[in-house]
């Protein structure tokens, strides 16, 4: 007999009610008296459990009554309407096979565990309600992103993880090497001889696929990356991980306005997709993690995102009654407190801040006519602050070379990046979205360690 | 005026014929006489070009007539039926704006370039027909894989790229470190003090997400990974790369047969999706790369995959008239020549070989009752040989510990992997599909360097 996913029972119950079915799953709880008992069974396909009722007539009644949380079982029986109010139906067991027992020291007993404790058993935590919901939403959000871009004929490009370019300047990098620390090959001057390393040069883990994907943008017009990126920064905060996934779309024949329109559509699409496809999980987050979550996301769906220049934003902040910890001054980067004030109090919806001073933004951003600001945009959202950073890219070779010179970057290291400006270069723009930040935003979870299956942070690479 | 993608013109031409439209793109060729000219324009959204016709009446006729390959332009005009037989329609230009010029040393002139040469300009090669087709198919195949698993309620898990576990035994690993080669911290015994490294321990790039995803399988029932994996093997062959993407599904309450059924469905789904969504690209490959490609893929779609045990396969090979370079003997691994003979000559379709001798397979594969073979499966396909490797996993703690002992693996290093067997462990199975091998199979391309945007191989990490 084929097994049926518990999700199917909930989504198409009319099809299964009164039928004999077979389900697999893991026991969440067992309550048993002498004559009958109840099992809350979860098979991982759906947020809710299936109630299984079993009676004394079961050949292995005693063993089943003694089942402990975490055991794996297979149940056959009839799906019937439930007399109880808590669930719409229940499975009347005719046969229960104990497939996998669970040792007595199972750490996930029926009680509240702290997120800190659950991080130490990251291999087991997706069996809890919270983490099952987080990682199901993560999976759905990843798919929604692919679906959004593919439906719009974007080409998904896999940019390299190992990179020979160590000069992107987006952050500290991890070295990738096969050289040993003992008997390291050295040249006559005593320096490490990286020509003997695996790739014949120094290599690192990428901090961004943007520069590479700009080249693909000039072949396909619309492209995106979705892959892991790395920062070797010793930041032990709830918002930083050494390994995280990033989405980086890039569009040709496009300016900053097109870029912001794309970001707004994408955000709304992903939020809408997750709310539609994981309503039980989203209700759970709204009830137990962040009571303002659904109201906030629904507000995003129906708002037109705001637009304000950096210079205007500085004025707004200076004229606000709010006391900020960090100074507000033209030329300084906005801090999270400023970003949240703008999004939460002033605009009360997501807002794009554009045209930042060139000195606080990357070399590849397009110079504005004022020669002081660049065509950059950050999307600030209530509850988080910055969630997306993007820009129109400098397509003019002379401007780009001038800017690289000012910053001491060597054109030879970027020969292929500069080539794109020489050979049919067009206006183009793109942005980066930190995937884990998005998941935190979608779930209300406040620590990045709780939205990554096996997080990598300073001094931590267990599992 | 909004721009229209050239793909839309081809797919919904009735909607656009006779209308005034605007397109962007890059010039593939220009032919011009004194009174008029033709431009073959490609915008990256579609395999075929759009023919643009321009006449002397154009204000910048002379500049347009002198346009070179690679230039970026924006064209406005009317889409009309083409008098020529080569294309169904053409764009009668009323206005052509030259958006991005192209320098005279543009390497992609209208002539045949070798794949070897094109690898040296990996940032420009997606502008050629072949590589535009390869990377569009790659993007579609990636999406098809997500779509297949998501439609079947699999949860997509992102397993870590940086791993503290160096003992998986699947291959040589790259070290990830922030320690310097000079003044490396050392303990009193003179050994490198990895407690001072970023993660406080030795870390490497992952060779597989399988062990981690097995833990998620025991929470969600059906899961998959799709991410980059790494091998620091000095193999300079057309089939090996140091960085490649892998898909690893894992299913609970499932045995080897379920595993093979899943692999067969997935292969057929992906092939079908790509043939349906990239017919122009597939025709191109069939014409210019591998003339038997479409016949082979269509044969896969309509075949039921074969099944044979390793022991039976050895007998078939021993009794075959074929002369093999490598010996055929029970206990030896199958070589590509053996795999291809089985798939191409004997079965003439994809075939699963199952139940390999335990000594040539990994420690986590489930021991068969004969105590000599394990519940492993390799999928062999005509034209390639092995494309998928999988197994039912050993869910019995005592068997697994015994096998680890035999192989000298330390249980402490695998505490979390063993936990899965202690706490509600069930029968489960999974497989790995090398994504680049799949793309080679789908396109007929014979070098892995030509299906990865910026390939990483020994002594090569350019871009």
Image (spheres, coloured by chain):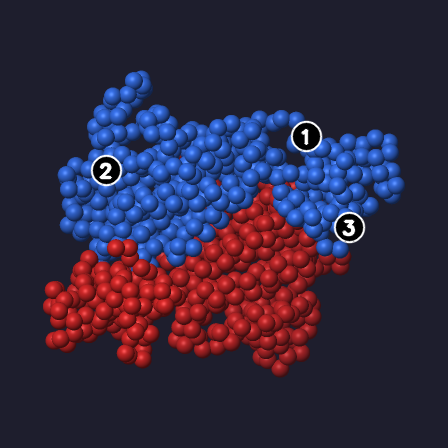
Chain colours: A blue, B red
Q: Earlier in the sequence, mark 3 or mark 1?
A: 3
| Residue at the (52%, 55%) spot, across then down | B147
Q: Are the numbered discs 3 and 1 placed on the same chain, yes or no? A: yes
Residue designated by label 1? A109
Rendered view: B135 above or below A177: below
Judge the density around disc 3: few (<14), some (14-19), many (≥20) Cα neighbours within 10 Å. some
Could you say which quadrant of the image residue A288 lies in?
top right
The location of residue A426, given as percent across then percent down, is 23, 55
Residue designated by label 2? A355
CA distance for labels 3 and 2: 64 Å
CA distance for labels 3 and 1: 31 Å
Of badges 3 and 1, the one in the foreground is 3
Judge the density around disc 2: few (<14), some (14-19), many (≥20) Cα neighbours within 10 Å. many
A387 sits to left or right of A74:
left
Q: Are the numbered discs 3 and 2 placed on the same chain, yes or no? A: yes
CA distance for labels 2 and 1: 53 Å
Q: Chain of mark 3?
A: A
Q: Chain of mark 1?
A: A
| Residue at the (61%, 54%) spot, across then down | B430
The location of residue A228, given as percent across then percent down, is 43, 45
Residue designated by label 3? A20
Numbered badge on residue A186:
none
């Amino acid at each position: 007999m084929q097994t049926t996913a518990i999700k199917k029972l909930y989504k198409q119950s009319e099809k299964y009610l009164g039928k004999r079915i077979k389900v697999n799953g893991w026991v969440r709880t067992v309550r048993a008296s002498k004559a009958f008992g109840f099992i809350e069974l979860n098979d991982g396909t759906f947020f809710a459990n299936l109630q299984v009722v079993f009676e004394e007539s079961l050949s292995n009644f005693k063993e089943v009554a003694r089942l402990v949380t975490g055991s794996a079982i297979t149940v056959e029986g009839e799906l019937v309407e439930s007399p109880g109010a808590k669930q719409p139906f229940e499975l009347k067991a005719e046969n229960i096979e104990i497939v996998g027992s669970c040792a007595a020291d199972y750490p996930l007993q029926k009680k509240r565990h702290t997120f800190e404790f659950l991080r130490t058993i990251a291999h087991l935590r997706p069996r809890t309600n919270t983490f099952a919901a987080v990682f199901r939403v993560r999976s759905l959000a990843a798919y929604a992103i692919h679906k959004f871009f593919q439906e719009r004929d974007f080409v998904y490009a896999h940019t390299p993880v190992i990179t020979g370019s160590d000069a992107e300047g987006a952050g500290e990098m991890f070295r990738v090497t096969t050289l040993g620390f003992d008997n390291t090959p050295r040249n006559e001057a005593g320096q490490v001889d990286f020509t003997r390393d695996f790739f014949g040069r120094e290599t690192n883990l990428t901090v961004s696929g943007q520069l590479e994907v700009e080249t693909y943008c000039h072949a396909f017009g619309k492209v995106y990356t979705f892959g892991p990126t790395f920062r070797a920064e010793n930041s032990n905060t709830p918002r930083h991980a050494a390994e995280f996934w990033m989405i980086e779309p890039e569009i040709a024949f496009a300016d900053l306005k097109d870029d912001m329109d794309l970001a707004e559509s994408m955000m709304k699409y992903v939020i809408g997709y997750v709310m539609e496809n994981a309503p039980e999980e989203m209700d759970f987050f709204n009830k137990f993690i962040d009571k303002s979550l659904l109201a906030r996301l629904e507000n995003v769906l129906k708002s037109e995102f705001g637009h304000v220049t950096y210079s205007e934003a500085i004025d707004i902040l200076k004229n606000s009654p709010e006391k900020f910890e960090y100074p507000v001054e033209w030329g300084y980067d906005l801090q999270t407190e400023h970003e949240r004030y703008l999004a939460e109090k002033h605009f009360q919806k997501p807002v794009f801040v554009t045209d930042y001073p060139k000195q606080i933004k990357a070399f590849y951003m397009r110079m504005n006519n004022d020669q002081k600001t660049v065509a950059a945009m950050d999307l600030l959202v209530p509850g988080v602050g910055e969630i997306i950073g993007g820009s129109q890219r400098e397509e003019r070779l002379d401007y780009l070379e001038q800017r690289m010179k000012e910053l001491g970057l060597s054109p030879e290291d970027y020969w292929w990046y500069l080539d794109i400006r020489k050979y049919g270069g067009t206006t183009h723009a793109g942005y980066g979205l930190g995937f884990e930040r998005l998941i935190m935003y979608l779930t209300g979870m406040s620590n990045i360690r709780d939205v990554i299956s096996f997080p990598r942070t300073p001094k931590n690479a267990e599992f």
